[in-house]
């Protein structure tokens, strides 16, 4: 398979091998017998060819392949689609005629000479396919089935490249960044709009026409190209032409400095080689040429530095122009707003009227209040109700404190009973000083329980319960 067919098979699912017999057959009869199949085959061919042209796989008579133009001059295009198994596509003429009739392709010269947008249709909104079918039915005209000849602009590819151009230039805001000579414009964008592809000169001619005439993105006079900003005039001014010439000259000087730098390096290597070979004449000649190249390089750098300074001043002046325009528009807006306000005297008058009307509202309110029943409040009743609420609140607090205190006392008593029960289990123990104590109490034997009981006799209910409980615990121990 040829390079073009191989690309279609590998990159377009509509050209998988199972579909190739149908696509290469003469499916023109399906236009009436199987309309859906006919439309599917035509659409597959149009998408596949558009993709192949954009990728640079379509043959071209020029040295560089086009990406926006399908070249149908001669027999090269059909040969590029020929295969050993299926031969040449038999209905390809029908496909291309349909693309021309529907405005998906346009003859190159017609596109370049058009005075109206390519999106304009003389027949209005009526689809061209319907019109052409009706004309064919009455025998007037209509697209035939022969393969057209010539070069044709593929509009889908043009839209793709146009979108890529808009994205690539979105950040170019200053007039200096947006203005180019024709040659500089092509060198700047030739390699960046399609991945791993370079647009040809014819591609650029078509693209500039499309962007300036149909998309209104560019302004050009044939020599200078300017990327338009919103609301900017389409005419190319003398300032634009001067900026374009300056940028092209700076680019030329930059290339010259690069060439001279490489030339100096080469002459230096040549001189060193001549010295090693003891060739004095060749060494001196190389050194002399090197000195001349270094002098030229120095001059180029000096000129380039001056031009860069001029470019900087131009950019600064352009920024100043934009700033002044913004200030002028802001002044106009403020003047209009102040005119609507009416000045300081009118504002004072409005405020005086406002105060007067507010005073009238207050006056009317006072009169209504005096005429109606007076709403009086008994201060003594309010004080009595407040005191009652305070008394009730204090009562609640005292009750809560009493409950808390009783719970604490009950807890301490329970702890004491628990300790007494533990002491009962231990039995009688000798207690120091128990004999004297026993004589005073009727000679009762002193046990831990009786000792604790003696202490409990002195217990009283009050805030010192905790101290007494601790005393009982010490005695029990």
Image (cartoon, grey):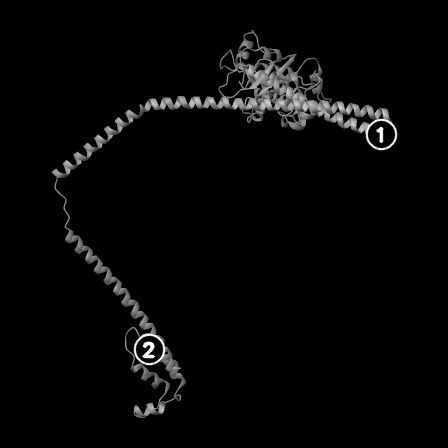
Provide the secondary structure element on which disc 1 rests. Answer: helix
Find residue 156 and report its image quarter: top right
- Where does the image place residue 236, in percent across and percent down from the top left? 55, 15
How packed mark 2 is, by other alpha carbons closer than 10 Å (few <14, some 14-19, many 20 or more), is: some
- Where does the image place residue 12, in percent across and percent down from the top left? 64, 27
Q: Are marks 2 and 1 in contact (CB under 8 Å)?
A: no
Front in this rendered view, residue 327 or 38: 327
Tell me if 275 is positioned left or right of 18 in this view: right
Provide the secondary structure element on which disc 2 rests. Answer: helix
Q: Residue at 52% across / 24% down in the picture?
A: 319
Q: Residue at 29% across / 27% down in the picture?
A: 347
Front in this rendered view, residue 391 or 144: 391
Mark-to-mark CA distance, 2 and 1: 120 Å
- Where does the image place residue 95, in percent across and percent down from the top left? 62, 17
Q: Which mark is residue 28?
A: none
Position of the C terminus by quadrant: bottom left
How packed mark 1 is, by other alpha carbons closer than 10 Å (few <14, some 14-19, many 20 or more), is: some
Tell me if 341 is positioned left or right of 309 in this view: left
* Residue holding disc 1: 275
Position of the N terminus by quadrant: top right
Q: Which mark is residue 468?
A: 2
Judged by depth in the image, the label closer to the viewer, 2 or 1, is 1
- Where does the image place residue 146, in percent across and percent down from the top left? 64, 12
């Amino acid at each position: 398979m040829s390079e073009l067919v191989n690309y279609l098979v590998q990159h377009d699912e509509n050209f998988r091998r199972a579909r190739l017999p149908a696509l290469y057959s003469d499916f023109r009869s399906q236009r009436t017998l199987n309309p859906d199949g006919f439309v599917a085959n035509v659409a597959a061919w149009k998408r596949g060819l558009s993709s192949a042209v954009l990728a640079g796989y379509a043959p071209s008579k020029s040295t560089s392949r086009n990406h926006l133009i399908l070249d149908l001059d001669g027999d090269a295009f059909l040969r590029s689609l020929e295969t050993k198994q299926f031969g040449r596509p038999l209905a390809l003429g029908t496909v291309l005629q349909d693309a021309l009739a529907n405005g998906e392709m346009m003859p190159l010269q017609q596109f370049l000479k058009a005075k109206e947008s390519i999106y304009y249709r003389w027949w209005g909104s009526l689809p061209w396919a319907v019109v052409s079918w009706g004309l064919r039915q009455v025998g007037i005209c209509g697209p035939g089935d022969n393969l057209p000849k010539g070069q044709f602009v593929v509009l889908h590819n043009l839209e793709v490249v146009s979108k890529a151009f808009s994205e690539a230039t979105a950040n170019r805001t200053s007039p200096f960044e947006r203005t180019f000579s024709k040659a500089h414009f092509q060198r700047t964008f030739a390699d960046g709009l399609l991945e791993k592809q370079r647009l040809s000169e014819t591609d650029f001619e078509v693209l500039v026409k499309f962007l300036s005439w149909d998309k209104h993105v560019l302004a050009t006079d044939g020599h200078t190209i300017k990327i338009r900003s919103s609301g900017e005039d389409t005419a190319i001014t003398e300032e634009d032409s001067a900026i374009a010439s300056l940028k092209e000259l700076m680019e030329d000087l930059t290339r010259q400095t690069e060439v001279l730098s490489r030339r100096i390096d080469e002459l230096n290597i040549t001189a060193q080689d001549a010295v090693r070979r003891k060739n004095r004449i060749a060494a001196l000649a190389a050194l002399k040429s090197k000195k001349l190249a270094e002098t030229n390089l120095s001059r180029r750098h000096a000129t380039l530095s001056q031009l860069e300074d001029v470019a900087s001043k131009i950019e600064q002046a352009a920024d100043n122009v934009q700033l002044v325009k913004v200030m002028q528009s802001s002044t106009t807006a403020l003047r209009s707003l102040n005119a609507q306000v009416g000045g300081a005297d009118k504002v004072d008058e409005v405020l005086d009227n406002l105060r007067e009307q507010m005073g009238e509202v207050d006056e009317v309110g006072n009169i209504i209040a005096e005429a109606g029943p007076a709403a009086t409040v008994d201060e003594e009743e309010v004080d009595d109700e407040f005191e009652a609420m305070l008394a009730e609140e204090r009562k609640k607090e005292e009750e809560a404190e009493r409950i808390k205190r009783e719970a604490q006392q009950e807890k301490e008593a329970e702890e004491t009973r628990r300790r007494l029960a533990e002491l009962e289990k231990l039995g009688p123990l000798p207690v120091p000083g128990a004999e004297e104590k026993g004589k005073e109490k009727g000679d009762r034997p002193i046990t831990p329980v009786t000792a604790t009981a003696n202490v409990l006799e002195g217990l009283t209910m009050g805030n010192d319960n905790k101290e007494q409980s601790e005393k009982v615990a010490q005695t029990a121990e």
